[in-house]
Image (spheres, helix red, strand yellow):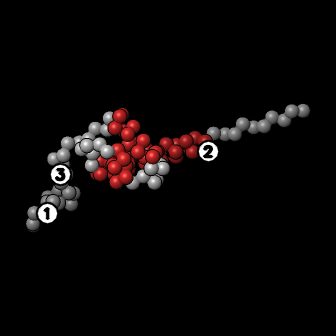
Amino acid sequence: MGSSSYGRNNGVRQYVRSKVPRLRWTPDLHHCFVHAIDRLGGQDKATPKLVLQLMDVRGLTISHVKSHLQMYRSMKNDATRQETSIILSTPYPKKQHVV
C-alpha cells in the first residue's frame, strides 16, 4: 500500500492540524465583520472576499472569513426558523363575540 492519507484507519482520513494558529473571533472583530456584511447589503449579498477587504484586518485570511460567514449564515437561518416555528405554533386568540 502506498503512502495514502487513509492508511490503516478503516478508510477514515487522518486529521492534519494546521500550523497557523486558530483565530479567536473577539466581540470587536465580530462587530467589524457584521458591520462589513451590513455595508454589503446583508448576509446573502456579502462574499468572503468583499468582507475581508472591508474589514481590512491584518492577519485575517479569506479562510477565516469564509468559515465565519458560513457559521453566521447558519446561525441566522436557525434563528429565523425558530422564530417562524414559534409564530406558527402559537394559537391565535379566539375572537369574543359581544352580545
Residue at the (33%, 49%) spot, across then down: 52
Q: Amino acid at mark 3?
A: Val
Residue 48 position, x and y percent, is 36, 52
Residue at the (39%, 37%) spot, across then down: 31
Q: Amino acid at mark 2?
A: Leu
Is residue 43 visible in the rendered image? The answer is no
Judging from the image, what secondary structure is the residue with disc 1 in? loop
Query: Is 3 displayed left or right of 72 in the figure?
Result: left
Residue 36 position, x and y percent, is 41, 45
**Which residue matches tag 1?**
4
Q: Amino acid at mark 1?
A: Ser
Whether 8 is drawn above or below 95: the answer is: below
Residue at the extreme left of the image, as rendered = 2
Give the position of the C terminus as an image quadrant.
Answer: top right
**Which residue matches tag 2?**
88
Judging from the image, what secondary structure is the residue with disc 3 in? loop
| Whole-number angstrom distance, CA of label 3 to CA of label 1 | 13 Å
Q: Which mark is residue 16?
A: 3
Residue at the (19%, 51%) spot, across then down: 15
Choose top left, top right, bottom left or bottom right for residue 58: top left
